[in-house]
Image (cartoon, rainbow, N blue to C red):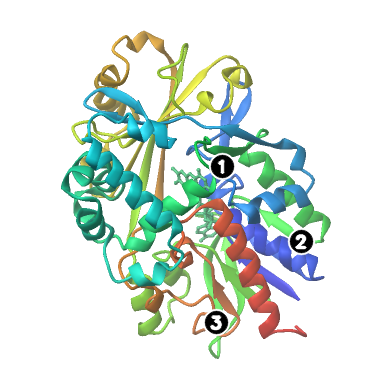
Amino acid sequence: MNIGIIGAGAAGLAAAYELGKHGHTAVVYETAPFLGGQASTFDVGGAPLERGYHHLFTSDTDIVDLIHEIGLGHQMKWIESTVGILHKSKIYNFVTPLDLLRFSPLSIIDRFRLGLVTLLLQRNNDWRKLESQTADAWIRKNAGKRVYDVVWGPLLRGKFGEEHYKEVGMPWFWGKIHTRFASRGKGLAKELLGYPIGSFGEVFDVLAERVAEQGSEVHLSTGVKQVIVQNNRAVGLETGPRDGPTPTQEFDAIIATTPSFIFPKLVPSLPDDYLAKLNGVTYMAAVLLILELDRPLTDIYWLNVADRSIPFVGVIEHTNLIPPEHYGGKHIVYLTNYLSENHPLYKMSHEELQAEYIPHLKKINPDFDESWIQNSHYHRVGAAQPIIGTNYSQRIPDHRTPIERLYLANTTQIYPEDRGTNYSVRMGKHVARLLLEDLPDG
Ligand SMILES: Cc1cc2nc3c(=O)[nH]c(=O)nc-3n(C[C@H](O)[C@H](O)[C@H](O)COP(=O)(O)OP(=O)(O)OC[C@H]3O[C@@H](n4cnc5c(N)ncnc54)[C@H](O)[C@@H]3O)c2cc1C
C-alpha cells in the first residue's frame, strides 16, 4: 500500500517509519522547509538548537526506543536537572523533598501539605476518578489556598492564561506530576532529563533517512491543500507550494497530523458531530524569545516564574543542561509564554517583545545587563498546547475519522498525558497499525 501522510513532525515521521516496517510505503508532505514540526531546530553557535526548548523524561520510552532503533542511542544523554521556582524575586530550588522543606514562602504545615498532595497524586494511578474535576478546583480544595496562591495557581495561570486556566481538567495536572516524578529516582534523588546530544533535529533527520531507505518519500515545503474524497472515501491528496501548481496524487489511505482547526479546511465534507469534537478543543499558542548571552543568567535549567507581574511563565536556561561549549560558548536562555492568539504579547514583534521582557530579567538576576545579550531569536507556535477540559475521555476525536481511509493523529488526541514528542511518536505508530488492521491487504 502507499499511504499519504500530512505533516513531517514526530507523529507523521513515526507513522511513515512504522508503515515501512510492515512493508508499505508512504509519501510525507510538510508545509515547512524543515522536518520536526514543533520540535524542529535552527542553528545557534554552529549547533542545531530547538526552536522551543525540548528534553525527555525517563518515562518517554517510545521516543527513546525509537532513537535507539534508528541508530542514535549513543547520542542520548541523561543529565541531572536543576529546577527552581521564582517567588518575589528569589529563586528557590524545587526538585527534592529537601528543597520542599526549605521552601520558606510556605509555612511548615503548607510545605508538608504540598509534599503530601504531590505524593498522593504520584501514587494515584486512577486518573479517571479525577476526570470530572478541574485542576484549579482540585488544587484549591486539596492543597489549600496558600499552596495554590504561592505555587500552583500562578503556574496554571501562566500556562493557560487568565481566560482558560479554570477550564483545564485535573488529568492534565495529574499527568504533569506523574511524568516529573517518574524521572526521579527514589528518596532524595534528583530528576534526570534526557537530551539527544545532536539535537531533536538530528533525530528527525535520521528518522527521515530510515524512512527513505524503506522506499518512502518526504517532501518539504510542500503543503497539502486538500484531501480528495470520493464516495466518502479518501483517495488522494492535492499538494504543492502555497501559490504554485496543485498536483494530485492517489493514495490507498491518508494520515493527517495537522492541528484540529486546520484539518476541516483540508476535508470540507466532515460531518457535524466529528467537527464538533474537533472544535471542542482550543489551543494556546507559544511565544519564545531565545537569548544568546555571553554569561549565565542563573544556575537553574528550568525556572518556573510564579509571579504574574512578570510577563513570561518560564525561563529555560538550556546551557544549564547542555554545556555552552556545545554552542560556541553561548549561554542560551528561552523566555517562554503560552498565550491565546488575541493576547497583546502574542501580537508584538520580536523587538517589542524583547523590550517588554528585558527589564524583568533583573528580578531574576539583579546583575543582569542588556549588554550580555549577543544575539536574540523569536519564535511562535500556533497550536502549541491544547486546552483539555473535564471528562475529555468522552469527547476525544477518534483517530478513525468518519471518512473511510482517512485517519487523524494530533496532540488533542493524547490523553490523559500532556502532549510531548514521546506521545506523538506513540500515536503515529498506533495510527499506522490501526490503518493496517483496517486495510490488511491494501
Ligand atoms: C515551546 C514548546 C516546548 C515543548 N517542549 C517539549 C519537551 O520538552 N519535550 C517534549 O517531548 N515535547 C515538547 N513539546 C511538545 C512537542 O514538541 C510536540 O508535542 C510534538 O512535537 C508534536 O508533534 P506532532 O507531529 O504531533 O505535531 P507537529 O510537530 O505540530 O507536526 C505537525 C506538522 O504538520 C505540518 N502541517 C500542518 N498543516 C499541514 C499541511 N496542510 N500540509 C503539510 N504539512 C502540514 C506542520 O508544519 C507540522 O510540521 C514542546 C512544544 C512546544 C511548543
Amino acid type, label 2:
Ser
Amino acid type, label 1:
Gly
- Percent coordinates x, y for residue 207 in the rendering: 72, 50
Give the residue pinned by disc 3: 229
- Percent coordinates x, y for residue 213 in the rendering: 83, 55
Dots 3, 1 in contact, CB < 8 A: no
Give the residue pinned by disc 1: 185
Instruction: Specify which label sits upstream in the sequence, 3 or 1.
Output: 1
* 190 relative to 59, above or below: above
Amino acid type, label 3:
Val
- Percent coordinates x, y for residue 187 in the rendering: 51, 40
Tell me the CA gap for discs 2 and 1: 41 Å
Give the residue displayed 42% in from the left and 51% down from the top.
Answer: 177
Mark in front: 2 vs 3: 2
Give the residue pinned by disc 2: 216
Instruction: Specify which label sits upstream in the sequence, 2 or 3.
Output: 2
Instruction: Specify which label sits upstream in the sequence, 2 or 1.
Output: 1
Determine crowd level at label 3: few under 14, some 14-19, many 20+ residues with C-alpha closer than 10 A: some
Q: Nearer the viewer, residue 298 or 99?
A: 99
Determine crowd level at label 1: few under 14, some 14-19, many 20+ residues with C-alpha closer than 10 A: few
